[in-house]
Image (cartoon, rainbow, N blue to C red):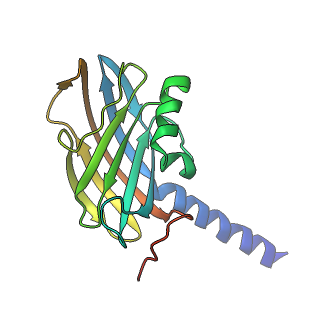
Amino acid sequence: MKAILGSVACALLLFSGIAAAQQVNGTLVANGKSAVLKYVVAQEVDSSTEKGYMDVIVVLSDRKVGLADARNIERLEAMTRNDGLAGLVVRLNPDAKIMSAEPLHPAFTTFLSSAAFVRWKPSAYDEKRVAGRFWTEGTQSEFRQQWSYDATFSAPITLDPDAKTVRKN
């Protein structure tokens, strides 16, 4: 009985540690409507530009997003249109450079994706964890859309099960 209780206690500590490792604090404003970003997932996927390397997709959102959804921008856009998802999807290359950033909000009339408007200050970026701050320099205005965001976050990085590239440790 003590062994079972000990195992349960260890499992609870492990799962609470995983939950505590995912942190985000931020907001996204789109066309005057605000959303609080409360959840983050990060996933390592095959690089879109550098064959044989891995990019990391970070999704900050107002609700929990599954890993399969997090790596599928079309699915996230559909969730925004159909379910009101608000979030920010950022793709980082192996050198921690932003390849793209797409704010998602039901107040947008079109989707926007560009690395030009986002700022990034990493506090961690390795094969296990990504952390830092994403923000815009004030309100951005393009394509008849206005947006701003500012979020700090920390998340463990999971590996895309469909990735072809093998991570070397």
Residue under the point 41% across and 82% down:
168
Q: Position of residue 104 (x, y in %)?
A: 39, 32
Q: Nearer the viewer, residue 130 or 98?
A: 98
> Is 8 placed left or right of 47 in the picture?
right
> Is 40 placed left or right of 9 in the picture?
left
For residue 16, above or below residue 119: below
Residue 94 lies in quadrant: bottom left
Q: Nearer the viewer, residue 152 or 119?
A: 119
The count of marks equals 0
Residue under the point 25% across and 60% down:
123
Residue under the point 33% across and 38% down:
102
Residue under the point 29% across and 16% down:
32
Seen from this angle, which residue lies furthest bottom?
Answer: 169
Q: Position of residue 47 (x, y in %)?
A: 36, 63
Task: Work out which quarter of the rendered image holds the N terminus and state it.
Answer: bottom right
For residue 116, above or below residue 47: above
For residue 9, above or below residue 42: below
Task: Work out which quarter of the rendered image holds the C terminus and state it.
Answer: bottom left
